Image: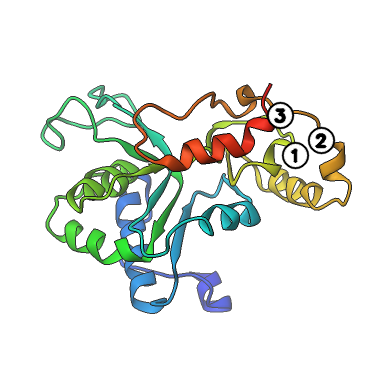
Amino acid sequence: MNEQKAHGDLVVENFIDTYLNLTLKSLFVIKYVKTHCPNVKYVAKVDDDVFLHVPNLHRTLTTKDTTEKLIMGYIICNSPVTFDPGSKWYSPHYMYTEDYYPNYLSGTAYILSSSVLTPLLEAAMLTPLFHLEDVYITGILAQKIGVTPQDSVDFSYYTNPRDPCLYQNLSVGHDMEPLQMYELWNTLHLTNMTTSCGPVTAAHIGYTSPRECSASPESHTLLSRLSSYFN
């Protein structure tokens, strides 16, 4: 609150900011953008431990049809519901009765086109809230509005080696400290980066082929684009 008063750079809503309220937090983000930023084409939801390579993301999004209803990121397929009360991702039966979640995107980072914002909010008004934000928004709500979450090879969920050559080809890298992000960003902008980079293997990004549940041709396109870097 002190930062908001001093700098006016935070959006403050009436809820307690906890892990179990991440769904509310993301819905408020969607509501804010829909209300105050009507001309944006895309919204990026990114966790604070994620490195976002904006030029690479821009390159990926410029290949998309701006009229397309898009929900894109790192897809998680056929994920079983966790009924263990000791788990961080525990879901009691009364909240979700199925054994598997619909395919959804990792909440570390995902992209929403402006065309899905209103449908998602309207669906949320008719769908009981669920505490796992990524499952709820990119899985349950996406299914209700008839949008299939799209997989993108340059969204990495795994903890990656801090290899700047790798991040020449990724839009998103997970599990980073602020100083690591700062150093990586500066390294990526060295003029000799491109010529000094050797081959990057698929194993480096924890991704060897388009994931089977992806219905998106985007993964195949991006994988082809990166294939020259793979051993």
Of residues 156 and 210, the one drawn nearer to the viewer in this rendering: 210
Mark 2 is surrounded, within 10 Å at the Cα level, by few (under 14), some (14 to 19) or many (20 or more) other residues, namely some
Residue 101 coordinates in the image, percent (x, y): 24, 32
How many dots with numbers?
Answer: 3
Mark carried by residue 164:
1
- In this picture the colour scheme is rainbow
Residue depicted at 38% across the width and 43% down the height: 150
Q: What's the CA distance linking mark 3 and mark 1?
A: 10 Å
Q: Is residue 138 visible?
A: yes
Dots 2 and 3: beta carbons under 8 Å?
yes
Q: Is residue 128 left or right of residue 75?
A: left
Position of residue 224 measured from the top left corner of the image (x, y, whole percent): 57, 35
Q: Disc 1 vs disc 2: which is toward the camera? A: 2
Identify the disc placed on residue 197: 2
Q: Are marks 1 and 2 in contact (CB under 8 Å)?
A: yes
Q: Would residue 16 be seen by someone viewing this image from the given angle?
A: no
What element does badge 1 sit on? loop
Q: Amino acid at mark 3?
A: Val
Find residue 167 and report its horizontal and vertical position in percent.
68, 41
The earlier-in-sequence mark between 1 and 2 is 1
Q: Earlier in the sequence, mark 3 or mark 1?
A: 1
Secondary structure at badge 3 equals: loop
Give the residue number, with chain letter if any, for mark 3. Answer: 200
